[in-house]
């Protein structure tokens, strides 16, 4: 009886125990699912963050590559530099080793920039400044080749005393920027020089025009009262000479104004240039004293057909001849031509005049440039000749020795 009673009681307790255990297991299962879900969510979030960081790193690296930037940091205590990423195209001796001493880095700076850049690095490493920005030249290799670089840096971490413990910075090449700056400075200087020359040109132009005009008017007034035939012929010759000078001045002004206004178009035709050159030589032979200056020609062929704008060619040679006569008081002037490479012709004027100094030869073809301000002229003849030569697809140049004479030439295609 007692055994039956005990069995009944244990059977009555097993049911609640069973349900209790089941509920506990279920609760633990739910708790496990919750924590698993939470862990999975956290892992997904971390993976997403890692993917975002990876994507950001890709974009960051792409930007560095596109801008050709190097990223680095400095340990100001140890005075070492470590390049974290370098996308510059520098080559040579630019070190990317870990913990490179700053003294080693500073040795590759150009000597004229070294002290300034080293001082700026010392200032930021010691905390005297919070920001570093310098432009300097770097020796690329043992040959001494230089390139321009620009660097920025700032203090990113300080220790408990406030002293810098980490400095981060970037560097990039700025050769193109420096070249652009140099070009702009050169253009500005040329513009200022051109403005100065133009001012001088306008100031002198009245004198240049008035001188031959006064001579023409004065000698013309004397003609009616001169009785001697020889004196009359002398006055007529002077009037003709000054007429030629005045026409040259006006032609130069008109030619330059038309070139600037782009009013002149090329009229290309096949022409025998030998008679044209002979006519120019004959015209200028009247302007020299044959007892002092011999004007000759050197034409290897009696006929030379050329497809060109003959009026432009005449102006080019006219500029050469006029220049030679102005600066040749004794000796000779020779006009000639020769073939080069079979399909080009070089027309030249050689004189034994005063010559041109080397420092003036590069600017002799610029507008309003006069090497000798005391010699009459507008300073436009050779610049007009250069413009015509380029429009005809040719080149122009000179060879000159100071005190011995000059040779001006233009090389043009035959067709």
Image (cartoon, grey):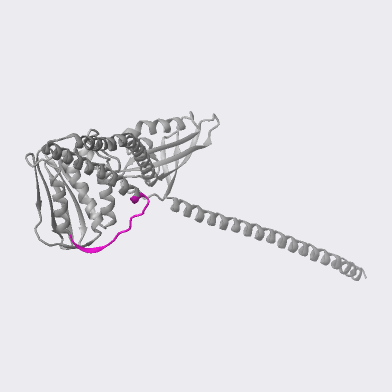
Total count of labels: 0
Q: Residue furthest left?
A: 291
Q: Is residue 31 above or below residue 109?
A: below
Picture residue at 15% right of the left edge, 43% below the top: 287
Q: Is 291 on the left-hand or right-hand side of 375? A: left
Q: Is 231 on the left-hand or right-hand side of 17? A: left
Picture residue at 29% right of the left edge, 61% below the top: 267
Picture residue at 36% right of the left edge, 54% below the top: 263
**Residue 394 shows in this picture:** no
Q: Nearer the viewer, residue 289 or 88?
A: 289
Q: Nearer the viewer, residue 197 or 188?
A: 197
**Residue 184 shows in this picture:** yes
Q: Is residue 298 above or below residue 72?
A: below
Q: Is residue 207 above or below residue 362?
A: above
Q: Residue furthest right?
A: 1
Spot occupied by residue 205 in the image (x, y as percentages of width and height) = 31, 37
Spot occupied by residue 103 in the image (x, y as percentages of width and height) = 35, 35
Q: Quadrant of the C terminus?
A: bottom left
Spot occupied by residue 30 in the image (x, y as percentages of width and height) = 75, 63
Q: Quadrant of the N terminus?
A: bottom right
Picture residue at 86% right of the left edge, 68% below the top: 15
Task: Check if residue 59 falls in the magenta segment.
Answer: no
Q: Is 357 on the left-hand or right-hand side of 53? A: left
Q: Nearer the viewer, residue 78 or 257?
A: 257
Q: Is 191 on the left-hand or right-hand side of 223? A: right
Spot occupied by residue 242 in the image (x, y as percentages of width and height) = 22, 40
Query: In the image, which residues are magenta?
Result: 258-272
Q: Is residue 312 above or below residue 171?
A: below
Q: Quadrant of residue 277?
A: bottom left
Task: Check if residue 261 falls in the magenta segment.
Answer: yes
């Amino acid at each position: 009886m007692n055994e039956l009673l005990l069995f009944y009681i244990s059977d009555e307790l097993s049911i609640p125990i069973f349900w209790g255990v089941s509920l506990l297991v279920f609760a633990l299962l739910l708790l496990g699912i919750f924590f698993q879900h939470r862990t999975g969510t956290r892992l997904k979030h971390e993976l997403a963050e890692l993917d975002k960081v990876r994507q950001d790193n890709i974009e960051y690296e792409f930007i560095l590559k596109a801008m050709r930037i190097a990223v680095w940091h400095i340990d100001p205590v140890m005075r070492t530099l470590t390049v974290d990423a370098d996308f510059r195209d520098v080559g040579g001796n630019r070190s990317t080793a870990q913990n490179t001493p700053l003294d080693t880095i500073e040795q590759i700076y150009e000597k004229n920039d070294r002290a300034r850049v080293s001082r700026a690095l010392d200032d930021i490493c010691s905390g005297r400044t919070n920001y570093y920005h310098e432009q300097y030249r770097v020796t690329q290799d043992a040959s001494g080749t230089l390139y321009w670089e620009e660097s920025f840096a700032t203090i990113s971490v300080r220790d408990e005393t406030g002293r810098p413990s980490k400095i981060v910075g970037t560097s990039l090449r700025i050769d193109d920027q420096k070249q652009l700056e140099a070009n702009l400075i050169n253009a500005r200087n040329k513009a200022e020089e051109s403005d100065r020359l133009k001012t001088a040109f306008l100031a002198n132009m009245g004198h240049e025009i008035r001188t031959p005009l006064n001579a023409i008017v004065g000698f013309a007034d004397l003609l009616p009262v001169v009785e001697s035939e020889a004196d009359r012929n002398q006055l007529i010759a002077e009037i003709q000479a000054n007429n030629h000078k005045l026409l040259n001045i006006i032609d130069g002004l008109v030619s330059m104004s038309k070139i600037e206004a782009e009013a002149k178009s090329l009229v290309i035709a096949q022409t025998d240039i030998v008679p044209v050159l002979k006519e120019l030589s004959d015209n200028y032979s009247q302007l020299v004293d044959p007892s002092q200056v011999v004007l000759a020609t050197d034409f290897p062929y009696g006929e030379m057909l050329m497809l060109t704008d003959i009026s432009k060619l005449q102006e080019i040679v006219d500029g050469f001849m006029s220049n030679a006569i102005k600066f040749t008081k004794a000796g000779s002037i020779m006009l000639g031509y020769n073939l080069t490479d079979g399909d080009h012709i070089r027309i030249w004027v050689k004189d034994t005049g005063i010559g041109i100094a080397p420092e003036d030869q590069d600017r002799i073809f610029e507008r309003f440039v006069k090497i000798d301000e005391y010699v009459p002229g507008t300073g436009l003849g050779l610049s007009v000749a250069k413009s015509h030569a380029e429009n005809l697809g040719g080149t122009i140049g000179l060879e000159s020795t100071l005190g011995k004479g000059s040779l001006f030439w233009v090389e043009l295609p035959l067709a």
